[in-house]
């Protein structure tokens, strides 16, 4: 008897869910007549479907709710656009953050805790924390150990307001701290570090560059900025000449400075997709068996390092 009752409840719940999903309005009186049960049973069935929808939201992020429509005197399904992250998305973001090694250990721990506590459904918090526990415990922070998040925000405001900044910067080639007046245009992240891209105002500094009037900015590692201040003075860039961060990002490799270059090479490795993902501007010109002739447009000298790192898989053809 108990088994038959359970089967009957499952059948009712499935029909309620199917009809709601089809956009129908369901009414308790109709259901009690159809299934030969009282309204309290139908109430429990609707609650069971509600619980199922809540569980589905936790796993998929798709929020659907059973609401009572008074004018229509029945229940309907309302789909709501959710801004919340699903538990799978939270886990993925945490893993990406840990792999980035962008912050000090203390700062990384704080960000992960806030992310999980504020964005993860309560029933999944413990599981998400458990899944990242070992990786967080063995997290290796960057050697500079700097905490620059407030500086990052202030630089972002200067970029937004088109204000000049003055920085004291630890130069890598001779470990000297130099002062620069800059037009900041973008903040980028690449392989463990945040970078500021900016145009140098001082013509005396620019005279030693490969291309004095280069249309591309200079790149500064933000953790090497010893101090900076935002100036009241603003700079103006015509809209047609604006710096396009996305286009620049597709062409820059390893955040090394240099000229805009066009390269062509032969690739004979196992995974050409890895090359195309690494070089967003890359284009396959020709394929013959396991060999691909590829061209790409890149910014700076970092591409040389990457080409050498590929060993015999890549043979450069020409640099334009």
Image (cartoon, grey):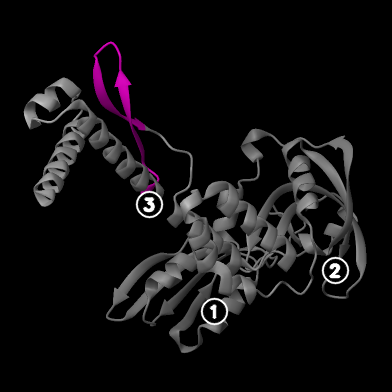
Query: Which of the numbered marks, if any, corresponds to residue 307?
Result: 1
Q: Is residue 65 within the magenta segment?
A: yes
Residue farthest toward the top in the current orientation of the protein:
71
Q: Earlier in the sequence, mark 1 or mark 2?
A: 2
Q: Main secondary structure of the magenta part?
A: strand
Q: Residue at x 58, y 47 (%)?
A: 118
- How many numbered marks, from 0 up? 3
Q: Earlier in the sequence, mark 3 or mark 1?
A: 3
Q: Is residue 17 within the magenta segment?
A: no
Residue 17 placement (x, y as % from top left): 21, 37
Q: Residue at x 46, y 82 (%)?
A: 314
Which of the pair 170/141 is nearer the observer? 141
Judge depth for marks 1 and 2 and give the one in front.
2
Residue contact between numbered discs 3 and 2, judged by CB atoms under 8 Å:
no
What's the distance in space between the residues labelled 3 and 2, CA to CA? 48 Å
Residue 311 placement (x, y as % from top left): 50, 87
Is 72 placed above or below 302 here? Answer: above
Q: Is residue 16 left or right of residue 285?
A: left
Query: Where is residue 135, by image quadrant?
Result: bottom right
Q: Is residue 173 left or right of residue 271?
A: right
Q: Residue at x 44, y 50 (%)?
A: 86
**Residue 104 visible in rendering:** no
Report which residue position mark 2 lands on: 171
Which of the pair 87/189 is nearer the observer? 87
| Quarter of the image where the C terminus is located | bottom right
Q: Residue at x 88, y 52 (%)?
A: 228
Which of the pair 313/44 is nearer the observer? 44
Report which residue position mark 3 lands on: 59
What's the distance in space between the residues labelled 3 and 1, CA to CA? 42 Å
The range drawn in magenta is: 60-79
């Amino acid at each position: 008897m108990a088994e038959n009752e359970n089967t009957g409840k499952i059948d009712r719940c499935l029909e309620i869910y199917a009809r709601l999903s089809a956009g129908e309005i369901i009414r308790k009186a109709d259901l009690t007549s159809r299934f030969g049960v009282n309204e309290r049973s139908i109430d429990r069935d609707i609650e069971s479907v509600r619980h199922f929808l809540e569980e589905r939201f936790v796993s998929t992020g798709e929020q659907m709710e059973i609401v009572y429509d008074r004018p229509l005197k029945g229940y309907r399904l309302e789909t709501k656009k959710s801004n919340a992250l699903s538990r799978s998305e939270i886990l993925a973001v945490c893993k990406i953050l840990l792999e980035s090694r962008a912050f000090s250990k203390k700062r990384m721990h704080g960000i992960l805790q806030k992310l999980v506590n504020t964005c993860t459904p309560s029933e999944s918090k413990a599981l998400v924390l458990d899944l990242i526990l070992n990786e967080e415990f063995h997290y290796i922070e960057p050697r500079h150990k700097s905490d620059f998040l407030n500086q990052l925000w202030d630089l972002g405001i200067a970029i937004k307001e088109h204000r000049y900044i003055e920085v004291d910067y630890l130069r890598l080639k001779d470990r000297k701290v130099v002062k620069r007046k800059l037009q900041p245009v973008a903040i980028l992240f690449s392989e463990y570090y945040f970078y500021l891209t900016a145009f140098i105002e001082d013509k005396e500094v620019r005279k030693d560059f490969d291309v004095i009037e280069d249309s591309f900015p200079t790149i500064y590692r933000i953790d090497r900025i010893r101090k900076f201040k935002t100036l009241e003075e603003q700079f103006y860039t015509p809209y047609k000449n604006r710096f396009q961060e996305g286009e620049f990002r597709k062409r820059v490799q390893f955040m090394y400075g240099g000229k805009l270059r066009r390269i062509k090479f032969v690739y004979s490795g196992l995974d050409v997709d890895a090359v195309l993902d690494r070089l967003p501007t890359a284009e396959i010109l020709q394929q013959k068996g396991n060999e691909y002739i590829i061209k790409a447009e890149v910014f700076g000298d970092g591409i040389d390092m990457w080409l050498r790192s590929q060993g015999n898989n890549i043979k450069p053809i020409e640099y334009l």
